[in-house]
Amino acid sequence: MKRSNPKTFYIRTYGCQMNELDTEIMVGLLEKKGLVKTDDEKLADIIIFNTCSIRDLAERKVLGKLGQLGRIKKNRPIIGVTGCMAMAKKEALFKKLPHLDFVVGTNNITDLSDAIDQVIEKEQTVLRTDNKFEENLDYLVASRDDKVKASISIIRGCDKYCTYCVVPYTRGREVSRPLENIVQEVKMLADQGYKEVTLLGQNVNSYGKDFKDKQFLFHDLLYHLDAIEGIERIRFLTSHPIDITLDLMQAIRDLPSLCEFVHFPIQAGSSRVLKKMHRIYTKEAYFEKVHLLRQTVPNVALGTDIIVGFPTETEEEFCETLDVFKQLRYECAFLFAYSERKGTPSSRWKDDIPEEVKADRLHRLMDLHNQIVGEIMTDFIGNTVEVLVDAVNEKGQLKGRSRCWKKVVFDAPSDNPHQFIGTLQQVKVTGFNHQTLKGEVLARELVGC
Ligand code: 5AD
Ligand code: SF4
């Protein structure tokens, strides 16, 4: 029977970049087991949903999709849930979805292959959802589609416990990855021709704080990685403002490979709301840090995350968020309406902002964001940006990102645009379309390999 001899698998990923990376690791583990990845779920003998719990909508999407799969009766594939929903719902998922075969949490990726074997051999459901992450993951098996840019994990979990956030419960306490292990992976990626790495963690700036035997922090890691030959660009994601130090700002200023973009999520513009969110900084302290960063790295671009409609947020407090946005002029922003998450401290408070008020605040903030982005994009016209080419679009044009994370598209300097993938090009900006800059290559002698 098909079920007892799986050959192909399909993984669908929801949520953040850490989930995307976990999928790449799972793909690598399953390929090592001799299974073949397919992009068509109908052809798959194993279907995995690597899920997200950050907002209600993310969970509803997965449950809807999994419910549909339940209708497949004959020769049905093995079906599993991994990621944050596995941690948030655990065995309750089996009750909700009787056709589910396994649930493997964020801290048990190493057990994936074994879980599948058990489903086949013992014909029973498997649940693996440890609350603590053990540093036993084979990061080096990750199977990546992108051949220019790679994400790597440097710290897992989060100890910050913002009152609205489910992550500390779905990903557990912070565990930093050993330096040697990170350096080994980055060197391997450089040898494979990768030009850019993004260091991932729920809060990368906490890196090293859990090391008992040595004093080695995030900025120390950056100095080590910058020295690796072949990696042109290093990025990191995401940061908690409280842990953005002067040492880190100076590293961004001084290290050639470190890109001048900092995701600096404020979450709300009112100090009262920030306190209720347990963000452990005030609006004033946040502004001081941003000013220090802009003094230290004058050309830095800023990104943020903001939640509107947090319980008890007043119209005046929301206007403080608009005001912060106008003053700081973020280049990139992820904007969300508050979504109550079971088990978090804020779920004990009444979700008292009506959905239509949340939607209205979100639209007003998005409008402001679009207006500011338009102004920032206009200011780029006439400037030259360095672009790492990572793809060719359907029109044969080159695509990539600037150091400050702007999307850029431009005509290839010669035929065969694919030869330029993985090269750095100096591009003069001539215009823009929404959030993408358009330009032309300045230095035509900078040809690809
Ligand atoms: N509701 C809405 N947005 C949330 N985020 C985290 N938890 C919630 C929630 N309960 C947002 C935060 C965080 C981003 C990843 O998701 O802005 O930075
Ligand atoms: Fe969630 Fe706060 Fe941790 Fe970010 S810092 S993952 S918002 S608890």
Image (spheres, rainbow, N blue to C red):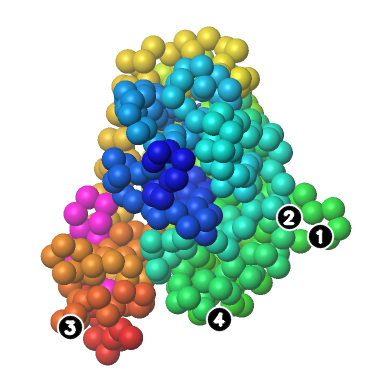
Residue 395: quarter of image:
bottom left
Label pair 1/2, CB-CB below 8 angstroms:
yes
* Disc 3: which residue: 414
1 or 4: tag closer to the N-terminus: 1
Q: What residue type is labelled 4?
A: Glu
Residue 174: quarter of image:
top right
Secondary structure beneath label 2: loop
Residue range (magenta): 426-437
Residue at the front extreme of this rendering: 1
* Disc 4: which residue: 229
Residue 62 vs residue 200, the one in the foreground: 62
* Disc 2: which residue: 208
Q: Which mark is residue 97?
A: none
Q: Is residue 388 left or right of residue 274?
A: left
364 inside magenta stretch: no
* Disc 1: which residue: 215
> Distance of mark 1 from mark 2, alpha carbons?
7 Å
428 inside magenta stretch: yes
4 or 3: tag closer to the N-terminus: 4
> Distance of mark 2 from mark 3, alpha carbons?
46 Å
Q: What residue type is labelled 1?
A: Gln
Q: In which quarter of the image is the C terminus?
A: bottom left
2 or 4: tag closer to the N-terminus: 2
- Name the mark nearer the viewer: 1 or 4: 4
Tell me, yes or no, if residue 400 can be seen here: yes
Residue 391 drawn at (x, y percent): 28, 66
> Distance of mark 1 from mark 4, alpha carbons?
25 Å
Label pair 2/4, CB-CB below 8 angstroms:
no
Q: What residue type is labelled 3?
A: Ser
Q: Is residue 8 above or below residue 71?
A: below
